[in-house]
Image (tube, helix red, strand yellow):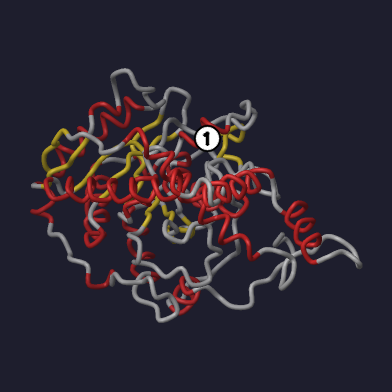
Amino acid sequence: LLRRHMGQYDATVVSRLKAAGAILLGKTNLDEFAMGSTTTSSCFGATRNPWNRDRSAGGSSGGSAAAVAAGLVPFALGSDTGGSVRQPAAHCGVTGFKPAWGSVSRYGLVAYASSLDAVGVLARSAKDAGLVHQIIAGPDSRDATTCIDAAASRIFGPNELTQLRIGWCPGHFSGSRDVPRGADQVERAIRELGRIAGQLVEIDWPHEAVLPATYYIIAMSEASSNLSRFDGIRFTRRAGGPGKSVDAMITATRSAGFGAEVRRRILLGTFALSSGSYEQFFAQASRVRRLVRDGLLNLLERVDLLALPVTTGSAPRLDAPDDQVAEYQADQFTVAANLAGLPAIALPCGIDGEGMPVGMQLMTRPDRESLLFAVGNAWQAATDWHLRRPSGA
């Protein structure tokens, strides 16, 4: 729908980068309307992973992750609605940061799910990601949801980083559940992080079984509302010739312009919002979301950080059979941060048995974003996973 559309103004994050002297090279590939975790739903084709061109770079911000991993740029931006910055960062061996909800302006961001969307940073190191985040974050009069001033975030001293309580769930790496590929590397990294930054505290991950369903009901419902503006009337491509009714023109435009995955999510979201299903699906998911947020914030009263995997495995093969359920389940470790509005960071932490990078994820309270960068810096000062590059990069 937007193939020939040129934006009429810069997003706030772009304006702030330009004002700081950044040279912006262009836009990168992503899943259509940010809906996907492989970039295979992009109308421009899939993004290949620089570590192995037969593998996906992840999604939805796969192009940004691949560009950083390949050494084309020192950093890139991406939107993160359920893991779309952190997951491709892990697949490409780079650092990916998702801010707290309300930390970075979304003015100029094409909305997917407004209560979940965040503009994040992909970079080669936590230090670089933190520098970029400082530039783009902060209140914006054009986005009333910005309510966190990153510049005022507390700075953590080196001595404090040896006394942290790091919550982790051993069940993420063993037991009856499907253990992620590369789980050994992630578990080893979390244990090492405990030695570097403090002590590990075993926790139970709240409402884990219902996280993906809760996320997708809310995200798809909000998407069906947000994407109703793409109707061919004001802008975008228009299908249908003269003589057609407005309704027929809108139907033809959306049927021809949206890809299969976007249509699927719009239809599922519209169903969840319909009069016969609203209470059973959207309203119930909204109540569960509150329980998830309360559970995570309660945990973060007992511990300083939460440590867990980023994804259910390393980058998938591009020629793998289409398995939509598995693709949705791949977000099970990332969606909690979006549902609860927490900041989270993905850090390279190992290479799996097939030579592909894997990452670990850290989350904390909304007012402690700087802690993630401080711990990320400490981790990367003690390890070299973030320095490793794909061949030729």
Q: Is residue 61 visible?
A: no
Give, as a three-letter code, the residue at label 1: Glu
Foreground residue among 184 and 336: 336
Residue 364's spot in the image, x, y percent? 24, 52
- Residue displayed at 12% across by 59% down: 157
To which quarter of the image does residue 236 belong?
Answer: bottom right
Q: Is residue 141 visible?
A: yes
Does residue 334 lie above or below 128 as drawn?
above
**Number of marks:** 1
- Residue displayed at 69% across by 48% down: 259
Name the element at disc 1.
helix
Label 1, on which residue? 327
In this rendering, position of residue 163 left or right of residue 241: left
Foreground residue among 42 and 94: 42
Residue 212's spot in the image, x, y percent? 42, 39
Does residue 83 lie above or below 178 as drawn?
below
Does residue 59 lie above or below 115 as drawn?
above
Name the quadrant of the N terminus: bottom right
In this rendering, position of residue 2 left or right of residue 155: right
Q: Residues within 10 Å of mark 1 (few under 14, many from 20)?
A: some
To which quarter of the image does residue 349 belong?
Answer: top left
Foreground residue among 197 and 221: 221
Residue 53's spot in the image, x, y percent? 61, 35
Extreme residue toward the top, this view: 176
